[in-house]
Image (tube, rainbow, N blue to C red):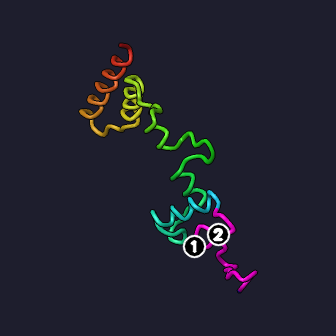
Amino acid sequence: MRQNGVRSNVRFPYGKGGSSKKKQGYKAREDESLGMRTGKESGKKATLKARRDESYGKWGSRPNQRINRAKGGSVHRNTRRENILEEKGRVDAEKAYTSKGKRALKGEQRRLARELKK
């Protein structure tokens, strides 16, 4: 199809050269990048928006994006107390099947309780 002496493709209006009339949007560019890096959408269960959010973080200022951390942002690391509480939760959820196992679990729970009191 020709328009004003210039060949235009209605299905893909972006063109190949730098003189294209229409520019691709941010989301379209990210979707294309995702497709090239991780495979096309039809092979995935998540939508392009979900994949885009997961890969690039929130759109706009993008506070959750990994790049920001590389520029000096802080990464949350667990405190000693949080680690002990996490371990205590795992031990409490564990089930002992023998008397020896019950004794070992009780000892572990006591040890973690003492650690928390420090």
Which residue of the protein is positioned furthest toward the bottom in this rendering?
Answer: 1
15 lies left or right of 68: right
For the point 45% across and 63% down, the residue is: 37
Disc 2 to disc 1: CB gap under 8 Å: yes
Which residue of the protein is positioned furthest toward the front in this rendering?
Answer: 5
Q: Which residue is mark 1?
A: 16
Task: Specify the amino acid type for callout 1.
Answer: Lys
For the point 61% across and 62% down, the residue is: 28
Q: The C terminus lies in which quarter of the figure?
A: top left
Local SS, label 2: loop
Q: Quadrant of residue 32?
A: bottom right
Q: Which residue is mark 2?
A: 20
- In the image, the segment drawn in magenta is 2-24
In front of the other: 6 or 47: 6
Q: CA distance from mark 2 to mark 1?
A: 7 Å
Task: Specify the amino acid type for callout 2.
Answer: Ser
In front of the other: 1 or 108: 1
Residue 12 against residue 34 in the figure, above or below: below
Q: Quadrant of residue 104?
A: top left
Local SS, label 1: loop
Q: The N terminus lies in which quarter of the figure?
A: bottom right
Q: Is residue 13 magenta?
A: yes
- Number of residues whose C-alpha sits closer than 10 Å to that of mark 2, classed few (under 14), some (14–19) or many (20 or more): few
Expressed as whole percent of the image width and height from the top left, the position of residue 95 reads 36, 38
